[in-house]
């Protein structure tokens, strides 16, 4: 991974858990949806390389080169269509934040334990 992408991801990783703490789960999902809407190609309804390149500065990613942007798309593109739909984008954002992923696991564990105790 290129250093500019690592720097952008490090900055994002620092902010995502803070956003989750302040906004709660629903608020965070709403903000992720807003981020998706900022980056997507409105005609296609997905984030393409061109829409990501055109709009990346809106999220502070203007220093990423073409290879970095392609790498981000490839990392999140689960269905192999060369673009990110909303679900792929949200999953990618969670994957880029290890701290938030750990918190999500803890929330899931707590919810499962609660359900098993109250069945």
Image: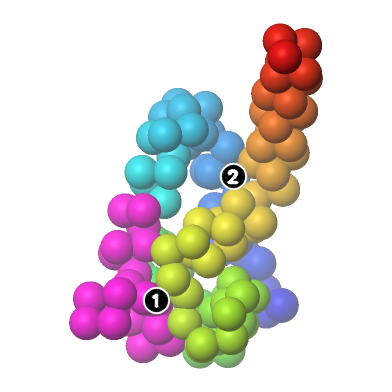
- Residue 29: image quadrant is top left
Residue drawn at 37 percent across, 62 percent down: 36
Seen in the picture, residue 68 relative to 12 is either above or below; the reply is below
Residue segment shown in magenta: 33-55
Q: Position of residue 57 (x, y in %)?
A: 35, 69
Depth check, mark 2 against mark 1: the one in front is 1
Tag 1 or tag 2, which sits nearer the N-term? 2
The reply to whether dot 2 and dot 1 touch (C-beta < 8 Å) is no
Question: Under tag 1, what secondary structure?
Answer: loop
Q: Quadrant of the N terminus?
A: bottom right
Residue drawn at 71 percent across, 10 percent down: 118
Report which residue position mark 2 lands on. 14
Q: Position of residue 119 (x, y in %)?
A: 72, 14
Residue 81 visible somewhere in the drawing: yes
| Count of marks placed on residues | 2
Residue drawn at 30 percent across, 63 percent down: 37
Residue drawn at 23 percent across, 76 percent down: 42
**Residue farthest along the top direction in this orientation:** 118
Q: Position of residue 24 (x, y in %)?
A: 46, 28
Seen in the picture, residue 24 relative to 74 is either above or below; the reply is above
Rate crowding at label 1 as few (under 14), some (14 to 19) or many (20 or more) other CA atoms within 10 Å. many
Image coloring type: rainbow
Residue 15 in magenta stretch: no
* Magenta stretch, main secondary structure class: helix
Question: Under tag 2, what secondary structure?
Answer: helix
Report which residue position mark 1 lands on. 47
Q: Is residue 6 left or right of residue 47?
A: right
Seen in the picture, residue 14 relative to 49 is either above or below; the reply is above
């Amino acid at each position: 991974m290129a250093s500019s992408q690592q720097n952008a991801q490090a900055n994002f990783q620092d902010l995502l858990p803070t956003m989750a703490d302040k906004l709660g789960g629903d608020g965070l999902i709403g903000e992720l949806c807003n981020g998706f809407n900022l980056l997507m190609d409105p005609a296609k309804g997905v984030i393409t390389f061109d829409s990501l390149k055109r709009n990346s500065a809106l999220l502070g990613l203007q220093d990423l080169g073409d290879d970095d942007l392609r790498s981000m798309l490839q990392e999140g593109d689960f269905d192999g269509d060369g673009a990110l739909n909303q679900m792929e984008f949200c999953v990618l954002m969670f994957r880029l934040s290890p701290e938030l992923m750990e918190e999500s696991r803890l929330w899931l564990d707590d919810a499962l334990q609660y359900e098993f105790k109250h069945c």
